Image (spheres, rainbow, N blue to C red):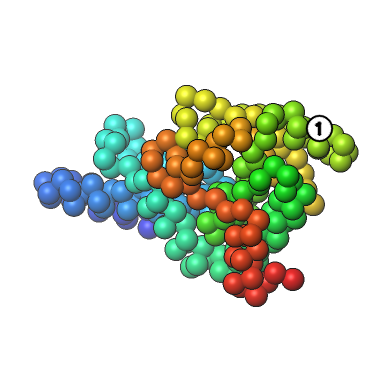
Amino acid sequence: MLLLARAHFLILALLSMNINYPSDAELLRAEIAAAAARMIAEDGADYGTAKRKAARLILGNQRVRGDVLPDNAQIEAEVREYQALFQGDEQSQRLLHLRRLALEVMEKFEDFAPYVTGAVLNGTASEHSDIHLHLFAESSKDVAVFLLNAGMDYEVSETPHFRRPDRSVETLSFFWKHEIVHLAIYEQDDLRGGARSSSGKRIERADIAALRNLLAETGSDD
């Protein structure tokens, strides 16, 4: 907290000195990204919530200009740095645990072309992280029936569509070995339609073979 207070003081001082705005904006973005990363790594906050809270923490009630807010890529880089500095082996073991469980679940749902995504895939999973999978089926009812036949209770919610921001997809969530798994169920055409998000960026996701390779690369696929 003391470091954040000093950073806030420095930012206000630079702004009062009329330093060139691009430099001010870069400094603000870096401080907001660092604060948001701590919230994500320590408290399990989602990126959007962490970004807003970090901006309020550093700038108070000042109106935040859009070009001052860091993007998710910058925040993710800060999350990785924070985890390397403060969580180390603990975070690595947690990530390995979640990846192994994700592979188990994906193998059970192999008929629905499962892909792992999110923090378990990109390597930033921590104590508060869940397992997020994309499934592709003719109907979400097929997945629901599969869960019921397996005697597994689940809850239903919605997740924003990765390529169509105006749409949501049904998501089934359940516990697997004391961890929460979220199955976002897409139409089969979404799988054939490419792996691009609504912003045009490539979606980070991995199928069963790719996840096995990730585990094998660390010598931990046993």
Q: Is residue 22 left or right of residue 32?
A: left
Residue at left offset 61%, top offset 50%: 116
Where is residue 168 shown, x and y percent of the image? 56, 27
Residue at left offset 66%, top offset 45%: 113
Q: Is residue 177 left or right of residue 196?
A: right
Q: Is residue 50 left or right of residue 119?
A: left
Quarter of the image with the C terminus is: bottom right
- Nearer to us in this view, 161 or 21: 161
When the figure is inspected, residue 62 is found, relative to residue 205, above or below; the finding is: above
Where is residue 198 shown, x and y percent of the image? 42, 35
Where is residue 181 shown, x and y percent of the image? 70, 44
Report the amino acid beneath label 1.
Answer: Val
When the figure is inspected, residue 48 is found, relative to residue 217, above or below; the finding is: above
When the figure is inspected, residue 196 is found, relative to residue 165, above or below; the finding is: below
Badge count: 1
Residue at left offset 43%, top offset 47%: 202
Residue at left offset 23%, top offset 47%: 25
When the figure is inspected, residue 203 is found, relative to residue 140, above or below; the finding is: below
Mark 1 closeness class: few <14, some 14–19, many ≥20 residues within 10 Å? few
Instruction: Read off the residue under disc 1.
Output: 145
State the residue lying farthest toward the top: 166
Q: Which quadrant holds residue 123?
A: bottom right
- Nearer to us in this view, 187 or 134: 187
Q: Secondary structure at mark 1?
A: helix
Regarding residue 9, the answer to whether it shows in the image is: no
Where is residue 62 shown, x and y percent of the image? 29, 33
- Nearer to us in this view, 37 or 173: 173
Regarding residue 20, the answer to whether it shows in the image is: yes
